[in-house]
Image (cartoon, rainbow, N blue to C red):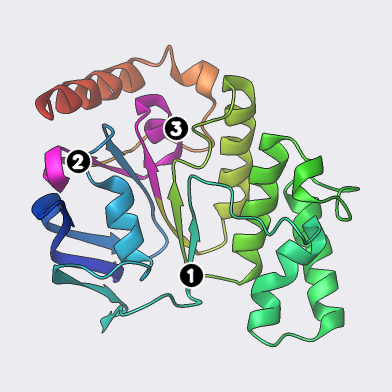
Amino acid sequence: MKSVLEVRDLTKQFVKDDLGIVALRDLSLEIEEGRFVTVLGRSGCGKSTMLNMMSGLMAPTSGVVRFRDEPVTGPRTEVGYLTQSDTLMPWRDVRRNVEMPMEIKGVEAKERRERAADLIERVGLTGFGRHYPRELSGGMRRRASLARMLAGGPEVLLLDEPFGALDAQLRFELQAELLRLWQGSGQTVVFVTHDIEEALLLGDRIVVLGRIGRVVLDKAIDLPRPRDADELRVDPHFVALHKEMADALRETR
């Protein structure tokens, strides 16, 4: 299967108080088209730095990111990025937030409205299109952010612990929603998390990162879809995979 996104010998160093701080060193990774890849790692291992460079928002110190064999030198419409923080425009209501990527691409107003209405319905926000971000719960803002990312029609979705700040039940609902939206879309997903169960529930493949981006484990996940979290928790194969991931994370200390 062809790689849609590739990082080769990726290194990022920041300078603080005249000291060089290495956030990522010599990371190489290929992301195959149409796959759901979960990147699992502890805080501080370089996961977010990796996504920032994959998205083109941050330049590497050395190494290269390629999208379909072309070097990534800045943000591109084929790659959508949902960060940990809330980036909805506070002065725009939900509908106009979702329309924003289409405005940038020059899509006509009528088509924008129709597409935005469809996405708002698909993420479970019907009736909230005229609400502003301040009027929404945290979970609803995450849904709106997901709809906005999808509105641009990206080929690759980069998600940086998008549900980490939510309560367990809401996180489960949005995980299921994301899988429903992804399945059959042909899109490629790179989903960063520190939660083993989330990584197993979502991913076709799990990449475990250690300190400064060292790949500790890279494993295909053969759990059948659709996946039900309650059923998986008592599945012997899931339990064995969970232990393997936990052991790999312990190596990253």
Residues drawn in magenta: 191-216
Quarter the C terminus occupies: top left
Amino acid marked by disc 1: Glu
Where's residue 167, x and y in %?
59, 22
> What label sits on residue 155 in the rendered view?
1
SS label for mark 1: loop
SS label for mark 3: helix
Q: Name the N-terminal-most of marks 1 and 2.
A: 1
Reading the image, the residue beneath label 3 is 201
Amino acid marked by disc 3: Leu
Residues 163 and 196: in front is 163
Q: Residue furthest top?
A: 234
Query: Is residue 32 something one can see in this rendering?
Result: no
Residues 171 and 136: in front is 136
Where's residue 218, x and y in %?
19, 43
- Residue 213 forms part of the magenta stretch: yes
The reply, left or right, for residue 243 in relation to residue 81 is: left
> What label sits on residue 209 in the rendered view?
2
Seen at 51% across and 17% down, the residue is: 231
Q: Name the N-terminal-most of marks 3 and 1.
A: 1
Seen at 29% across and 22% down, the residue is: 242
Q: Residues within 10 Å of mark 1 (few under 14, many from 20)?
A: some
Where's residue 230, x and y in %?
53, 17
| Disc 3 to disc 2: CB gap under 8 Å | no
